[in-house]
Amino acid sequence: MSSDQDLKQRVHTAYADVKDRVHDRIVGMEEVIDLLLIGILSEGHCLLVGVPGLAKTLLISTLSELLDLKFARIQFTPDLMPSDIVGTEVISEDAATGDRGFRFMNGPVFANVILADEINRTPPKTQAALMEAMEERQVTIGGRTHSLERPFFVLATQNPIEQEGTYPLPAAQLDRFTFLINVEYPSRKDEYKIIRTTCAPRDYRTDVILGGDEIVGLLDLVHREVPPPEVVLEATRIARATRPDDELASDTVKRYVAWGVGPRGAQAVVQASKVRAMLHGRDRPNLDDVHALAVHAFRHRLVLNFRGEAEGETAEGIIREVLAGGAGERRRTTVAAGGDRRRTTGHRGRVARR
């Protein structure tokens, strides 16, 4: 059995190989690819938000091929039923005896990678069919519980335009996603390359980079790794500083935020930080990992109040302000303490607006 150090080296090497293969099909999207890999290897789920035609589906299916994972796509529509996702029990007859009984037929959720395409276009009852699967890695039908095979990831997409007739995801379901990933338009250079390469014959390399057993081993390794105390403290500080009734909250947070980030958000950042460190060839995560991931892990968990929405504030802007304020407070405390980094406090004053 490979040692933990061997597994870390394996994922670091595989990281470069996966990105190289993905770029055979996908132009640019560096940060999106990184966040998806970090989300997958921290055993989380990701919500991708972007307009149609930005290769979100192609990216997810490509990753599932390179990681040798069973892929299933579910197109969410207004008439989709929960049984269309999780499966249903049907009456079957034994040809030999003539006995009849119920037999469970698996739905598409019984795969390793689930692409929930345009998840906000189906009613809440159907959206909720994914809740148990995402949190417990199991589904319950007819009073019977069916376990889902590891690894299991839900990668959902959401279209930010044409919102008529859509059903926004409730906060409880948004909280199940490790990251909310914004997929932006490509740069002019990248868009030219996309059009040039997709309008001509080309070859793809589809060899597997990581097998399913290796991925499960990596998931177990991430859970075994003990995070450094400073990483846990910083993730906790940032999460608490987004809550308007907390002593760490700035005036901006108190003014514009209705609900801040809960403990699940800080947990997601800590787990994802361990994976980010491994991908970059480091044994332990650091504060840079926390800060690089906090916006993506927190922005869908922070709820603005009416004043914040009316004045055009954004969750992302407020989180970046919290990060900037915490950095300033740490610097001030370090100077006051004569360089003793153990004496740190959270930010309490208003940060200058960007």
Image: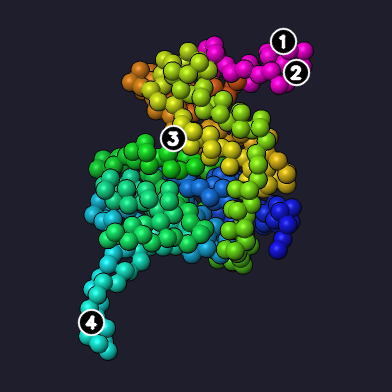
When asked about the image quadrant of residue 300, the answer is: top left
User: Residue 120 location in percent, x, y?
Assistant: 33, 45
- In contact (CB < 8 Å): disc 2 and disc 4: no
Identify the residue at horizontal 73%, vertical 44% (top origin). 283
Frontmost of labels 3 and 4 is 4
User: Residue 154 location in percent, x, y?
Assistant: 45, 52
Identify the residue at horizontal 38%, vertical 50% (top origin). 132
User: Residue 146 location in percent, x, y?
Assistant: 38, 61
Find residue 336 and name its label: 1
Instruction: Give the CA separation, mark 1 to mark 4.
Output: 81 Å
Q: Which badge, 3 or 4, comes first in the chain's sequence?
A: 4
Which residue in the protein does label 3 denote? 300
Foreground residue among 239 and 52: 239
324, above or below 161, in the image: above
Find residue 99 and name its label: 4
Find residue 170 and name its label: none
Q: What's drawn in magenta, residue-wise?
A: 327-354
Amino acid bearing label 4: Asp
Please, what secondary structure does the residue beneath circle 3 have?
loop
Which residue in the protein does label 2 denote? 340
